[in-house]
Image (spheres, rainbow, N blue to C red):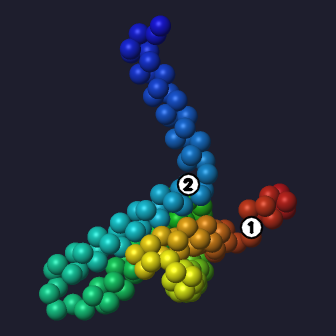
Amino acid sequence: MLPPANIWELMMNRLCVLVRKLYGHSFVRFAAVGGVATAVNYGTYVILIHNFDNLYPAIAYVLAFCVSISCNFVLSSYFTFGVKPTRARAVKFLTAHLINLFNELVLLEIWLWVGVPKLYAPLCVFVVAFPVNYFMVRFALRGKSHAAAKEEE
């Protein structure tokens, strides 16, 4: 049997290997960036609501979305897809997110129409919209699909 120090070292080594493997997948990095962007969005919204008593919630939400989408674009560019942020990519990124917002609203209405309770319908939307948004953002930031880019090399 291994001494406790060696077991700890073995577990840490396995954890490091797992983290490196996960980091190698852009989808996992996309999920992490999405989590950060969601936290930034909500945090900004809460700060605005608490500090500006007369600020209408919809305006606070739009301002929070703007802060979040800016953070999301920079993190998605560098961390998720490893590309340099440019004005053209920013326009494509924003367009992808606006299209995804429209898709989410349509999906929400569909889930509600089929009888999913309004409390749970957004969860169903996220399950469908998340992978769609991943591919739209990847295309917006990288251009061609990853497979097409590999074929050209």
Mark 1 or 2: in front is 2
Q: Secondary structure at mark 1?
A: loop
Looking at the image, residue 104 lies above or below residue 147: below
Left or right, 75 with reference to 46: right
Residue 92 seen: yes
Residue at 16%, 92% (x, y): give it: 54
Residue at 85%, 60% (x, y): give it: 151
Q: Position of residue 90 (x, y in %)?
A: 54, 78
Q: Secondary structure at mark 2?
A: helix
Q: Hey, what amino acid is under mark 2? A: Val
For disc 2, the marked residue is: 28
- Characterize the local packing of mark 2: few (<14), some (14-19) or many (20 or more) Cα atoms within 10 angstroms: some
For disc 1, the marked residue is: 145
Residue at 32%, 72% (x, y): give it: 42
Residue at 60%, 56% (x, y): give it: 26
Q: Nearer the viewer, residue 31 or 151?
A: 31
Residue 104 seen: no
Left or right, 128 with reference to 44: right
Q: Which mark is residue 128?
A: none
Q: Hey, what amino acid is under mark 1? A: Ser
Distance in Å between CA atoms under marks 1 and 2: 18 Å
Left or right, 117 with reference to 142: left
Looking at the image, residue 139 lies above or below residue 82: below
Which residue sits furthest top? 1
**Image quadrant of residue 49?**
bottom left
Q: Position of residue 80 (x, y in %)?
A: 55, 59
Q: Earlier in the sequence, mark 1 or mark 2?
A: 2
